[in-house]
Amino acid sequence: MLAVVQFPGSNDDRDMRFALKGVLGAETELVWHKRSELSSGTTAVVCPGGFSYGDYLRCGAMAKFSPIMAAVRRFAEAGGPVLGVCNGFQVLCEAELLPGVLVRNHHLHFVCDFVHVRVERAAPPFTSRARAGDVLRLPIKHGEGAYFAEAEVLARLERNGQVLVRYCEADGTPTAAANPNGSLAGVAGVTNEAGNVFGLMPHPEHAVEAAIGGVDGLAILGSLVDAVRGARGRR
């Protein structure tokens, strides 16, 4: 079962559930933030987009104190896959489950648009349906999506292959013009060192139907579903 966490102000939780359950056929549960434990059959956790706690203080800064986040931390530390999208990425960074932080867009404007991201590494549990170098077209909608990390941290992420997706042109070339928010090195998403926690600013759950935005999001969400199905089959 994939757990989709609901914080006060989440607004992509049901969209995520639709993508995982309605499109990919995965068993999915909405989990309210006040719960102190995940269900016993949880195979993955997703922190969705939105404006948790109204984005007071900093995006994700209050959500990290929700009771469910202690359970998410235990799940991640045990090797369980955890995905954070947009606000969920911010929450995971604030909770120190991912390195770095998301800050105000360099132009100080909220941005809502489609972008291209290049898959830097193809591997389970998040990008096994893609190949390194594949370009995905995904939507973004955020005001604080610029990824920042200290120089030595960013160098380590690059060295370890923890930058999983990077903003680019449609042909895969990373350029300043293709970077919608001023993220350092065009970073659109990173993993933890173990590779089982992944956060990204673009929304794969809004790119799962050809009629409305395309299906490139399935490369990420489908990889996660494949991973938990495979793990269940090995047990």
Image (cartoon, rainbow, N blue to C red):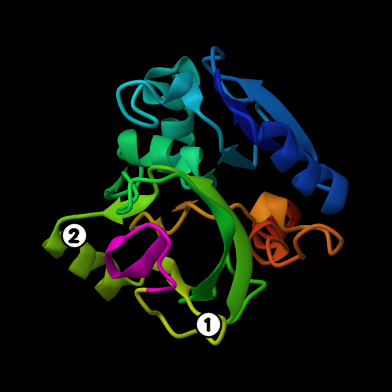
Residue situated in front as seen by the camera: 222 or 44: 222
What residue do we see at 55% from left, 33% from top?
A: 50
The residue identified by callout 1 is 132
Q: Residue 45 got which mark?
A: none
Left or right of 229, for residue 76: left
Residue 186 is situated, as x and y percent measured from the top left of the image, at: 36, 68
What crowding class fits label 2: few (fewer than 14 Cα within 10 Å), some (14-19), or many (20 or more)? Answer: few
For the residue labelled by badge 1, is the local secondary structure a helix, a strand or a loop? loop
Q: Earlier in the sequence, mark 2 or mark 1?
A: 1
Residue situated in front as seen by the camera: 84 or 216: 216
Write the start and end of the magenta stretch as one range: 177-188
Residue 206 is situated, as x and y percent measured from the top left of the image, at: 70, 51
Q: Amino acid at mark 1?
A: Ala
Q: Amino acid at mark 2?
A: Val
Q: Are marks 2 and 1 in contact (CB under 8 Å)?
A: no
Residue 132 is situated, as x and y percent measured from the top left of the image, at: 52, 82
Residue 178 highlighted magenta (yes or no)? yes
**In the depicted structure, whether residue 188 falls above or below residue 21:** below
The residue identified by callout 2 is 153
Residue situated in front as seen by the camera: 36 or 61: 61
